[in-house]
Image (cartoon, rainbow, N blue to C red):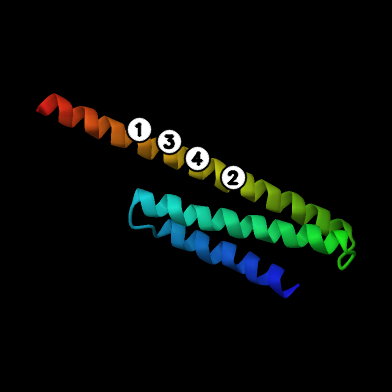
Amino acid sequence: MGQLIRASASVGANYRAVCRAKSKRDFIAKLGTVIEESDESMFWLEYMEATELLVNAAVKKLRGEANELVAIFTASQKTARANYARERNERREKRKKNC
């Protein structure tokens, strides 16, 4: 139970760090940590349910919400990576034209 609490709290703390990222690369990297911690939280919920440490409908709801958060964070990171790559390529093309 303690590990679930630590991983879950880490999601919030690391997401706050994402919001204060110093660059786009930093944003993408910090979002990766949020994804890892979210996934770990989901793992502990699944583990507690499988070992019957927790047995109730609330656990299923929490697992569903944890899964949604992992999906949201993953999609956000994928979009940020694509935008970063596109912007980098545009800057390169602009430099080539100016030479």
Q: Are marks 3 and 4 in contact (CB under 8 Å)?
A: yes
Q: Do the residues labelled 2 and 1 touch (CB within 8 Å)?
A: no
Is 79 situated above or below 17?
above
Residue at mark 2 to residue at mark 1: CA–CA distance: 21 Å
First along the sequence among labels 2 and 1: 2
Residue at mark 1 to residue at mark 3: CA–CA distance: 6 Å
Where is residue 7? Give x, y as percent: 64, 66
According to the picture, the residue beneath numbered tag 3 turns out to be 82
Viewer-side residue, 19 vs 78? 78
Between disc 4 and disc 2, the foreground one is 4
User: Circle 3 — which element?
Assistant: helix
Residue at mark 3 to residue at mark 4: CA–CA distance: 6 Å
Q: Residues within 10 Å of mark 1 (few under 14, many from 20)?
A: few
First along the sequence among labels 2 and 3: 2
According to the picture, the residue beneath numbered tag 4 turns out to be 78
According to the picture, the residue beneath numbered tag 2 turns out to be 72
Q: Are marks 1 and 4 in contact (CB under 8 Å)?
A: no
Q: Residue drawn at (59%, 56%), measured in percent from left and top?
A: 36
Which quarter of the rendered picture does the C terminus lie within? top left
Residue at mark 1 to residue at mark 4: CA–CA distance: 12 Å
Where is residue 29? Give x, y as percent: 44, 53
Q: What residue type is labelled 1?
A: Arg
Q: What residue type is labelled 3?
A: Ala
Q: Are marks 1 and 3 in contact (CB under 8 Å)?
A: yes
Between disc 2 and disc 3, the foreground one is 3
Q: What residue type is labelled 2?
A: Ile
According to the picture, the residue beneath numbered tag 1 turns out to be 86
